[in-house]
Amino acid sequence: MLPPRALQEWLPEGHLACFISDLVDQLDLSEITDRYEQERRGGPPYHPRMMVKVLLYGYCVGVLPSRRIARRLHEDIAFRVLTANNTPHFRAISDFRKHHLAALSGLFLQVLMLCQRTGLVKLGHVAPDGTKVEASASKHKAMRYRRMKEKEGQLSAEVAELLRRA
């Protein structure tokens, strides 16, 4: 069996990692990248866009700690695709997150709001333990643009809590 020419060929069409990669490629990361342009010490760091992709994908699949993310970079094809087969050390991931916490918080909020507007996500917790919960799907509870603007503060708080837990 010959390996594929590109790592992306290992993932099925429409995989979440491909979506995250395309999404991060469209984001303005100048708040993060400006810091590295003046840096003259040591070797070049891992590309900030790659690190944002890894962190965002890790958060989406529930892998929050940097040590677990680093382990998944060796074991998980989707993580390897996002890093182009690079394997940053857990300290590099942790330090990147620490140094750019404010910028990442803003980026993640933008991503969540974009995904929520397009109907890709609903925020909350899922507990697959067999519990039946009554649905509350009424036209009065549907998300409108005005209500979405009101929820922006709640989204910011949830992003801050996610980053604090990570």
Image (cartoon, helix red, strand yellow):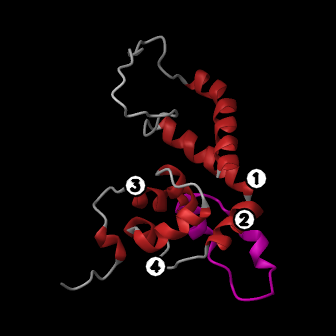
Q: Position of residue 4 (x, y in %)?
A: 27, 80
- Residue in the picture at 50% in, 57% down: 57
Instruction: Give SS at disc 1.
Output: helix
Q: Which mark is residue 16?
A: 3
Separation (CA) of disc 4 from disc 2: 22 Å
Instruction: Give the residue type that dot 1 points to.
Output: Ala
Separation (CA) of disc 1 from disc 3: 24 Å
Instruction: Give SS at disc 3.
Output: helix
Q: Position of residue 158 (x, y in %)?
A: 64, 37
Q: Are there few (<14), some (14-19), or many (20+) residues within 10 Å of tag 3?
A: some
Residue pointed to by mark 2: 32
Separation (CA) of disc 2 from disc 1: 10 Å
Near-viewer residue (19 or 82): 82
Residue 82 in view (yes/no) = no
Near-viewer residue (69 or 118): 69
Instruction: Give SS at disc 2.
Output: helix
Q: Nearer the viewer, mark 4 or mark 2?
A: 4
First in sequence: mark 4 or mark 2?
2
Q: Quadrant of the N terminus?
A: bottom left
First in sequence: mark 1 or mark 4?
4
The total number of labels drawn is 4
Instruction: Give the residue type that dot 2 points to.
Output: Ile
Separation (CA) of disc 4 from disc 3: 17 Å
Q: Are marks 4 and 3 in contact (CB under 8 Å)?
A: no
- Residue in the picture at 51% in, 23% down: 143
Q: Are marks 1 and 3 in contact (CB under 8 Å)?
A: no
Residue pointed to by mark 1: 102
Q: Which mark is residue 85?
A: 4
Q: Residue furthest left?
A: 1
The magenta stretch spans residue 33: yes
Magenta stretch?
25-53
